[in-house]
Every structure is written in C-alpha cells, then in structure tokens.
Amino acid sequence: MCLQPMPQPRSTQISLDATPYYHCVARCVRRAFLRGRDTESGRNYEHRRDWIESRMHKLTEVFALDIAAYAVMSNHYHVVLHIDKKSADK
C-alpha cells in the first residue's frame, strides 16, 4: 500500500525567510492545448500566448508578486515568482 502525502496549507509550504522566489507550474489536462498547433485537429492556439502573458503581468499589479521568468509551452507554463514582502505587509 502506497501512502500519499497529505496536502499542506500554503502557509507551511512558503517560507520567505528561506527564499522569496518560487517556481510554479500549471498543466493542461486531457491532451488539451494551451498554445501552438494541435497536430491531431490542426487547430492553432497561438493567439492564447499573448493573452496568457498579459494576464500574468496584470496579476502582478493586484498581488504582491513580481515575475522573475516565465515560459509558455504548448500544454503547460512555468513562472518564477518573487514575493514582494514589503508590498505584502502593507
């Protein structure tokens, strides 16, 4: 029997004393395409790249985060976030 680790609240996963930088990943499910050309259907989803990028940058205006780096791939994206502690403490 394989025991799965219990989910942990973010407050125990994030330690700004250890680092203010966090690498986050989000994936599509069921072979869905986030951007690029779907080779099976032939549909092109490249127009989504600009929307994803602009949305990420817009969210930095709302939350106490800065984007250090990001990559938008065909079925997932990576973003390295810097938590702005001074702004969050206001």
Image (cartoon, helix red, strand yellow):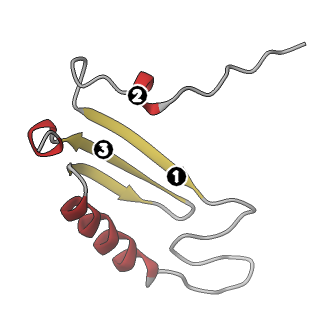
Q: CA distance from mark 1 to mark 3?
A: 12 Å
11 with respect to 75 (left or right): left
Image quarter for residue 53?
bottom left
User: Do the numbered discs 3 and 2 sit on residues whose CB atoms are within 8 Å?
Assistant: no
Amino acid type at image mark 2: Ser
Amino acid type at image mark 1: Ala
The quadrant of the rendering that contains the N terminus is top right
Q: Position of residue 21 (x, y in %)?
A: 25, 34
Q: Which mark is residue 26?
A: 1
31 with respect to 62 (left or right): right
As displayed, is residue 33 above or below residue 68? below
Q: Residues within 10 Å of mark 2 (few under 14, many from 20)?
A: few
The quadrant of the rendering that contains the C terminus is top left
Q: Which mark is residue 11?
A: 2
Q: Position of residue 16 (x, y in %)?
A: 24, 25
**Element type at mark 2:** helix
Q: Which mark is residue 80?
A: 3
